Image (cartoon, grey):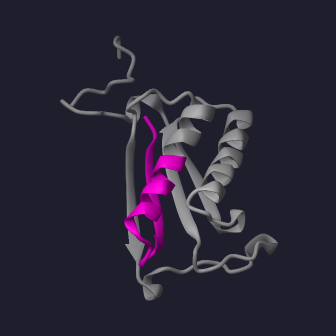
Amino acid sequence: MPMTRVSLRRGKPAAYRQAILDGLYLAMRETFDVPDDDRFMTISEHDEDDFSYGKSYLGIARSDDLVMIQITVSKTRTIAQKKALYARIAERLSSSPGLRPEDIFINLVEVAPENWSFGHGIAHYAPRDA
């Protein structure tokens, strides 16, 4: 059920972008118990003028290879699971496509489970008696 949006500077090859999506999906499966085929992800590429970030916020030296990741999930995970997810994403994306950990920015957005409809106008995770 995660919905993942990735933003990065324009110009990376398709294999690089696909490696990001694959690494994110695998990290979520490993740490968030995401089911097989529960994959809803997009990548948006931005020109230099449309991509702004703090190059040294919190003492982290970021480069123009920064990847901003926003993952929307149901509010059901523990802090330990969230920390494990962040660490696993950094490990996987450092391995492939070769991102520096400093260039991996993650924002987790939590919503109530009833805020999802995967098709047919059905609130799939809403209590049946509601």
Q: Residue 75 at what x, y percent from top left?
A: 55, 34
Is residue 75 in view from this perspective?
A: no
Res 55 quadrant in image: bottom right
- In terms of depth relative to the viewer, which is nearer, 130 or 23? 23
Classify residue 103 as left or right of residue 24.
right
Could you tell me if residue 35 is visible in this image?
yes
Give the farthest residue toward the left: 120
Residue that extends furthest to the right in the rendered view of this protein:
59
Is 2 left or right of 52, judged from the image as shown? left
The residue located at (59%, 71%) in the rendering is 66
Q: Residue at 78%, 70% (x, y): give it.
A: 58
Residue at horizontal 45 percent and vertical 50 percent from the top: 4
Front residue of 94/64: it is: 94
Q: Count the marks.
A: 0
Q: Is residue 14 magenta?
A: yes
Which quadrant of the rendered structure holds the N terminus?
Answer: top left
Q: Is residue 8 above or below residue 39?
A: below
In the rendered image of this protein, does residue 123 appear above or below residue 7?
A: above
Stretch in magenta: 1-23
Residue 24 is situated, as x and y percent measured from the top left of the image, at 53, 48
Q: Which image quadrant is residue 28 in?
A: top right
Q: Position of residue 36 (x, y in %)?
A: 42, 28
Residue 121 vs residue 38: left or right? Answer: left
Residue at the outermost top position:
129
Residue 47 spot, x, y in % from top left: 41, 83
Residue lying at 40% horizontally and 29% vertically, measured from the top left? 114
In magenta stretch: residue 21:
yes
- The C terminus appears in which quarter of the rendering? top left
Q: Quadrant of residue 62?
A: bottom right
